[in-house]
Amino acid sequence: QVQLVESGGGLVQPGGSLRLSCTASGSIFSINAMGWFRQAPGKERELVAGITRGGTTNYADSVKGRCSISRANAKNMLYLQMNSLKPEDTAVYYCYAGIDNRPGYAMDYWGKGTLVTVSS
């Protein structure tokens, strides 16, 4: 079994910063693409940022220039640095990873989410 556990969410004022972390553990042979998604109340889950194993990144237009995704492959960890936060960034943030449990056997995994609330 594989688990993804997020941390770092919380309440922050507009203009503030947060750093989210995600730790993958369990039966892991290799981790391929990873990403952060978010879901605000009443809205669909959307991609915030993604990163390949080699470090190529992509971002939603809404967070470009304000967020930075990174990963530590040796530690099976994923990070999201969020700056200049806005009330519209309020959402539950989910960690995603495409993981090979063994060579050639890939599955998608999701964390349970961490709540980010941007409010004064």
Image: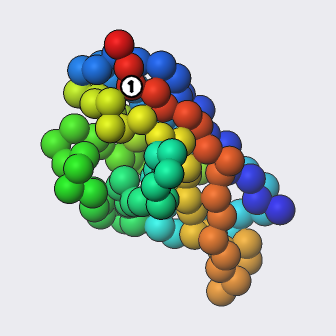
Q: Which amino acid does label 1 sit on?
A: Val
Which residue lies at the image location 48% right of the left edge and 19% below the top edge?
A: 11
Instruction: Name the image colouring.
Output: rainbow
Is 120 or 62 nearer to us in this picture? Answer: 120
Which residue lies at the image location 61% right of the left edge and 44% below the top edge?
A: 113
Relative to residue 99, is residue 6 depicted above or below? above
Question: What is the count of numbered marks?
Answer: 1
Q: Which residue lies furthest to the front in this view?
A: 42
Quarter of the picture containing the C terminus is top left
Which residue lies at the image location 38% right of the left edge and 47% below the top edge?
A: 70
Circle 1 — which element?
strand
Residue 44: % across, % down: 47, 60
Side of 17 relative to 107 (left or right): left
Relative to residue 10, is residue 56 depicted above or below? below
Which residue lies at the image location 27% right of the left edge and 57% below the top edge?
A: 60
Can the viewer see residue 120 in this picture?
yes
Relative to residue 113, is residue 46 depicted above or below? below
Residue 66, quarter of picture: top left
Q: Mark 1 points at which residue?
A: 118
Within 10 Å of the Cα at label 1, are there few (<14), some (14-19), or many (20+) other Cα atoms? many
Relative to residue 9, is residue 120 depicted above or below? above
Quarter of the picture containing the N terminus is bottom right
Residue 55: % across, % down: 34, 59
Q: Residue furthest bottom?
A: 104
Q: Which residue lies furthest to the right in this view?
A: 1
Residue 96: % across, % down: 55, 59
Residue 80: % across, % down: 40, 40
Can the viewer see residue 24 in this picture?
no
Residue 56, quarter of picture: bottom left
